Amino acid sequence: MRLAVREVLELAERCLSAAGFPAGPARAAAEAVWWTELYRGSGLTTLRGRLPALPEWDPDALTTTDRSEFVWVVDGSTQPGLVASTPAVDLASAAATHHGVGVVHTRTAPGDDTVPTLGHAAYAAAERGLLSVVLATGGAGTPRTVIGRPDDPHPILAERELDTPSAGHAALAAVARAGANDRRDNPLTQAFFTGGPETEYGTAGERLLDRLLHRSVAPSGADSRVDPGFTLVCLDPDHARHSGDLRRVVDRFVDGGALTRTFRPAEIRDRVETALDDGVAVEESVWRDVFDRSSEVLAPEFEGSYRGAGFNINE
């Protein structure tokens, strides 16, 4: 069967509202489902696979365990990436805007199979004008790296699925475990700037980003430890902190063949136009299961429905 694009978003939002999500988090997670349906054709299928776990999902269960100027370590070990990703985007984006870089390392539930939705985090950050890198692994999901770059009318996204968590993810996980408040130096510098392959770029900012990108697709060692979860890195390419042309670094890396799938603005524009004209194809059984759960919404909206909307990460 085919659903209108708007119906996918509204169906996912009603389903999450029926599970007890406040209005703001329900909408945010529904947008990630919508994005995954449009880009991957699997958003509602991913949501349907997690319907039995919905009563355990709680946006308020995220806890900050450590933080520094622009690094956050978040414990979401009882929650899937779908629940934790939007707060991570908000934190990393705010830090990148103020400090030039924002890093959020989030631990998620073992067996999390919502990893495909995490590409939306890279997309959402790029829509805010930031360069973004998502390094993800999950107990039931394939490790992957997703890179986002602002463009018009849609961000450029490129990704690669991996057999093991990336060396970059392992390095940042180790930095996060070391304790953000005990570090005086840029954690990205600690993780990437010492050692690693030589780079052709002349400025420190370009070399740092180049190493980050290359290590984001390189396999981690056998002794590396990466808990289920994801790390989101956001950089403001126009911030005074950075030297060189960071956009050029991303463009050359995306064009270099290290990534296996690229979504370019023209392709996405065509995909969106087709979806708007023809709708998106969804298995009827998937629609039925999600629709049945969404029908459990008991109360209509009222004036105070959106009061307090948004995420609260406990500290």
Image: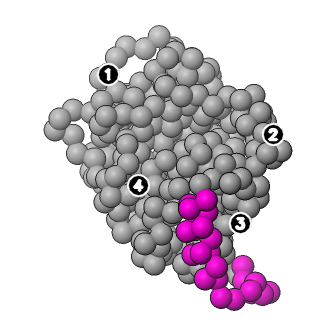
Of the image marks 4 and 1, the number of the one nearer the N terminus: 4
Looking at numbered disc 4 in the image, what kind of residue is underneath it?
A: Asp
Other-residue count near label 1 (Cα within 10 Å), few / some / many at <14 / 14–19 / ≥20 = few
- Amino acid identity at mark 2: Glu
The colour scheme applied to this rendered structure is: one colour
Q: Which residue bears the numbered disc 3?
A: 10
Q: Mark 2 vs mark 4: which is more N-terminal? A: 4
Q: Mark 4 and 1 residues: CB-CB less than 8 Å, in contact?
A: no
Q: Which residues are magenta?
A: 284-306
Q: Position of residue 103 (x, y in %)?
A: 47, 48
> Can you identify the residue that label 2 sits on?
273
Residue 207 inside the magenta-drawn segment? no
Q: Relative to 94, say whether 13 is above or below.
A: below
**Residue 34, image x, y percentages:** 65, 54
Disc number at residue 151? Answer: none
Task: Give the residue displayed 43% in from the left and 14% down from the top.
Answer: 199
Q: Which mark is residue 113?
A: 4
Residue 263: image quadrant is: top right
Q: At numbered mark 2, what does the secondary structure look like: helix, strand or loop?
A: helix
Q: Residues within 10 Å of mark 3 (few under 14, many from 20)?
A: some
> Does label 4 or label 3 sit earlier along the sequence?
3
Residue 247 in picture, x, y percent from top left:
63, 26
In the image, residue 41 sits, relative to residue 156, either above or below, namely below
The earlier-in-sequence mark between 2 and 3 is: 3
Q: Which mark is residue 196?
A: 1
Q: How far apart, in angstroms, are the residues tagged by discs 1 and 2?
A: 43 Å
- Residues 254 and 267: in front is 267
- Does the CB distance between marks 4 and 3 fall below 8 Å? no
Which mark is in front, 4 or 1?
4
> Is any atom of residue 181 visible in this view?
no
